[in-house]
Image (spheres, grey):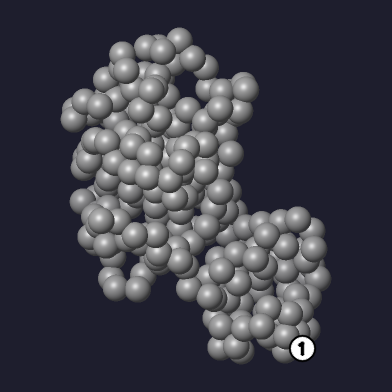
Amino acid sequence: MAYEVEAPKYVRLAQTIQRRIEDGTYPPGTRVPSENQLVQAFGMSRPTVVRALELLKRDGWLESRQGYGTIVRGRPAAAEQRDRRGREALERDESLTSGRLVEVGQVPVPARVASALGLPKRTKVLVRRFLVEADGEAVELVSSYFPAGLVDGTELDSPEALSSSPREHLEARKKIRFDHVTERVSARLPESDEAELLDLSEGMPVLSVLVIACDASGQALQVSDVLLPADRQELEDTYRLN
């Protein structure tokens, strides 16, 4: 049985600060609230606040300037890279991708996917789970979920790799059209089977890009959960010093 695992407090705090950076509450170039202010505002311990800030600095959202404090850098290129990973999940041709299909079948819809698909919890959906590899190492785990009623008349339930992306296959077989995509980026602890497939050490978090693909009416046709090991993300970023 799979369980939903809540992210650690420091990760949830980092996500909250990240959202405030993106919505302009903490504009680029300004100082974030002090550790004391964050402790009081969120009711969390100082070690939790410090760890959240260190995570955001590591990922490029914040930087420390001697004599000035912690400064907002804004949305880093790393976030754009994760968004591209999400979009690529919809376009990926399984037969041409380095990796393997590790699961195809009906499963109870995970809570994080149920709301996106507009389904009651525990409703059965089809999952296609693909492990993407590079140089023999697992780099992504893509779990794509489809409403059961959308599977009839397709080969989505085939245990063999599709000769196209699931999106292209659905558009061709069901005469439907994907119109827009919403992506939700977060960090969480992996479930045991996810950690095993990605060969993660105990306690290592993953970055999750939840890709919700809809038709013009807003009805979700496919939800893909793209998991990226946090210790295998690389980015080179050059910026000017003031």
For residue 152, above or below residue 124 = above
Name the kind of residue labelled 1 in the image: Gly
State the image coordinates of residue 236 (x, y, percent, origin top left).
52, 59
Q: What residue do we see at 21% from left, 42% from top? A: 102
Q: Against 145, is 227 above or below?
A: below
Q: Is residue 238 left or right of residue 115?
A: right
Spot occupied by residue 76 in the image (x, y as percentages of width and height):
62, 58
Mark 1 lies on a secondary structure that is loop
Can residue 211 be seen here? no
Towards the viewer: 214 or 108: 108
On the question of residue 242 being in view, the answer is yes
* Label 1: few (<14), some (14–19) or many (≥20) C-alpha neighbours in 10 Å: few
* Front residue (pair 84, 191): 191
Q: Which residue is more in the foreground, 237 or 222?
A: 222
Residue position for label 1: 67
The residue sitting at 33% across, 37% down in the picture is: 124
Q: Residue at x 33, y 48 (%)?
A: 141
Asked whether, in this view, residue 154 is left or right of residue 47, the answer is: left
